Every structure is written in structure tokens, then in C-alpha cells.
Amino acid sequence: MKKHLVRLTDDDRTELRVFTRSGTRSAQAITRARLLVMADEQGESRNDADIARALGVTVHTVEVTRKRYVQHGLQAVLQRAPRKDKGVPQKVDGRVEAQLITLACSDTPNGEPAWTLQMLGDALVR
């Protein structure tokens, strides 16, 4: 894979510094931010294997992050990419959810003290 050289601007470097110090970001995003700082040609500029080892990621992750920064910019690296697919299809739609709520709020069968997940599942399947 072609090595993409990361050359952070002063603004990007400042944003990454603030980004990694705020405690409200995902661990993945902070790792990607730290990765860019380590890969910066004007800063530490470590090789991919050293960066991967230091951050506990794969060399492939370092390569992909470098490429994404060079091709799409800082925000593309820091923000999670939208899914291409719709994910796992929803198993419970609004109608089933309403039935489940109605059932859970009703009296239990056979004088049971409370509904169990197994009892709710069995009742919904019937």
C-alpha cells in the first residue's frame, strides 16, 4: 500500500490536541487523533509499525487512517463514517413493541409473581 504522508496544519494540530484532552470522545476517535499526531511529518513522524505498537492497533489501521486524512481531511478521520448498509434488520417493529408493553403491564398468568423474559417471549409467539 502506498504510504500517505501526514502533514498536519497548525490548526489541525491544535484541534487534535484539544480533541484528545476532552473526555467526551470515543476511545476509537481519540486513538485515531493520537495516531495522526504520531504520523505527522513535521512532528514525531514515527513509522507505521511503531505507531501501531504504541497505540495497540494494526498497521493496516495506521495506513487507512493516514490515507483517509490525506484524501478527505481531519473531520473524515475524527467522525465515524456512516454505514454503507442498514445494519441488522429490526426484529421488533412498533406493533410488536406495543404488544410487548401491553403484555408486560398486564396480569401474569397462573398467579406468577412477575413476568419473566421467557414468559413474555412465549406469550408473544403464541
Image (spheres, helix red, strand yellow):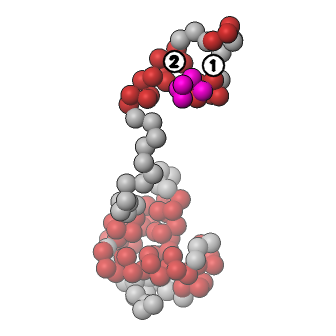
Helix, strand or loop for disc 2: helix
Q: Quadrant of residue 52?
A: bottom right
Q: Which of 101 and 63 is in front in this view?
A: 101
Q: Earlier in the sequence, mark 2 or mark 1?
A: 2
The magenta stretch spans residue 105: no
Whether residue 14 is visible here, answered yes or no, is: no
Q: Does the magenta stretch include residue 125?
A: yes
Q: Which quadrant is home to the N terminus? A: bottom left
Taking 53 as reference, is 73 left or right? Answer: left
Label total for image: 2
Q: How crowded is mark 1: few (under 14 residues within 10 Å), some or many (20 or more)?
A: some
Q: Is 122 situated above or below 40?
A: above
Residue at numbered disc 1: 115
Q: How far apart are marks 2 and 1 (CA)?
A: 9 Å
Say which amino acid is labelled 1.
Trp
In the rendering, at what x and y percent does residue 81 appear?
Answer: 37, 63
Residue 103 position (above or below residue 88): above
Q: Quadrant of residue 14?
A: bottom left
Q: Main secondary structure of the magenta part?
A: helix
Between 83 and 63, which is closer to the camera in this rendering?
83
Numbered badge on residue 103? 2
On screen, 67 above or below 89? below
Marks 2 & 1, CB-CB < 8 Å contact? yes
* The magenta segment: 122-126
Q: Dot 2: within a 10 Å radius of its alpha carbon, few (fewer than 14), some, or many (20 or more) residues?
A: some
* Residue at image location 58% in from the left, 9% down from the top: 107
Q: Position of residue 85 (x, y in %)?
A: 37, 59
Which residue is at 33% across, 66% downward? 75
The amino acid type found where label 2 is placed reads Leu
